[in-house]
């Protein structure tokens, strides 16, 4: 297979920045990954080789087809859970970026069935609650990872048309119509999860009404550039 061509330089720069931002914000650590749909071909996406996100440079970005086949790996190893990304890009033409993480505050919601819901405006994209993907119901006993396209497609079905899907006993996956939007959602999913666990100790929580969530999301989508510029500046020069 031949590559879709050289991606836009700004796309690569933003993808590298996204890796470092998500690490700096505590969404990813040694594990977790963020991808972007290729700007030259919607049936291709870009993702780093298997490595810690904080260390990613533009030289580490590999092009993949939507089945998770590397086009230009040149011997570099790829993430085991590559299939998360292609399956979601197949199912969701609107999605341009995918973040998969094990961000800690979110984990309790995947294992208790407590509904992760927006309790403030920044996480309004959580809408009326967050779907949970339970790999055991799909595939029985596994090592919990999305290791093939069948599991990837199941995860994409669980995500549906939502912004975030929780993965029981594992983590979560957030999507966006741009790299900044996917990063914004991954960060504020973690923040909301932390706040929801804390608020629940104080008393019953008044969540955003679905209509409040819809209106706040419209507003937020117009201002994502502001935190994005801050986050991007904070991770230094991108190489
Ligand atoms: Mn994982």
Image (cartoon, rainbow, N blue to C red):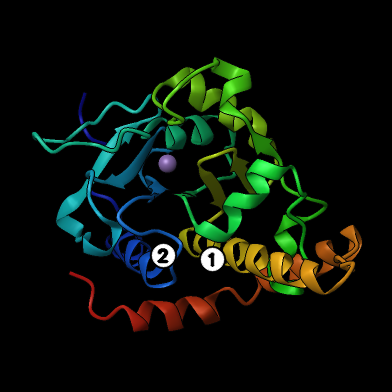
Q: Residue at x 64, y 28 (%)?
A: 157
Are there few (<14), some (14-19), or many (20+) residues within 10 Å of tag 1?
A: many
x 17%, y 36%: residue:
77
Question: Regarding mark 1 in the picture, which secondary structure is present there?
Answer: helix
Q: Residue furthest left?
A: 75
Q: Earlier in the sequence, mark 2 or mark 1?
A: 2
Q: Which mark is residue 202?
A: none
Residue 198's image quarter? bottom right
Identify which residue is drawn at 90% across, 67% down. 204
Image coordinates of residue 45 in percent, x first then y, are: 36, 41
- Residue 22: which numbered mark, if any? 2
**Figure quadrant, ligand 1:** top left
The crowd level at tag 2 (other Cα within 10 Å; few <14, some 14-19, many 20+) is many
Instruction: Determine the secondary structure under disc 2.
Output: helix
Quadrant (top left, top right, bottom left, bottom right) of the C terminus: bottom left
Left or right of 212 in this view: 77:
left
Numbered circle sitting on residue 187: 1
25 shown above or below 91: below
Expressed as whole percent of the image width and height from the top left, the position of residue 88 reads: 53, 35
Image coordinates of residue 16 in percent, x first then y, are 29, 62
């Amino acid at each position: 297979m031949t590559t879709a061509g050289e991606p836009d330089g700004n796309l690569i720069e933003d993808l590298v920045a996204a890796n470092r931002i998500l690490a700096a914000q505590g969404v990813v650590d040694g594990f977790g990954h963020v991808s972007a749909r290729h700007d030259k071909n919607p049936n291709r996406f870009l993702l780093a080789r298997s490595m810690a996100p904080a260390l990613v440079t533009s030289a580490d970005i590999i092009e993949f087809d939507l089945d998770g086949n590397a086009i230009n790996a040149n011997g570099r190893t790829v993430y085991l859970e590559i299939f998360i990304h292609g399956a979601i890009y197949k199912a969701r033409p609107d999605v341009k970026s995918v973040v998969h993480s094990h961000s800690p505050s979110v984990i309790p919601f995947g294992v208790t069935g407590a509904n992760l819901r927006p309790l403030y405006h920044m996480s309004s994209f959580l809408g009326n609650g967050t779907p949970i993907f339970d790999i055991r119901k799909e595939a029985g006993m596994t090592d919990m990872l999305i290791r093939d396209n069948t599991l990837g497609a199941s995860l994409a079905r669980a995500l549906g048309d939502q912004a975030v899907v929780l993965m029981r006993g594992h983590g979560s996956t957030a999507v966006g119509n741009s790299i900044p939007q996917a990063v914004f959602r991954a960060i504020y999913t973690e923040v909301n999860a932390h706040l929801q666990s804390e608020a629940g100790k104080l008393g019953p929580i008044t969540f955003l009404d679905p209509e409040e969530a819809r209106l706040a999301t419209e507003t937020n989508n117009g201002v994502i550039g502001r935190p994005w510029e801050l986050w991007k500046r904070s991770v230094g020069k991108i190489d």
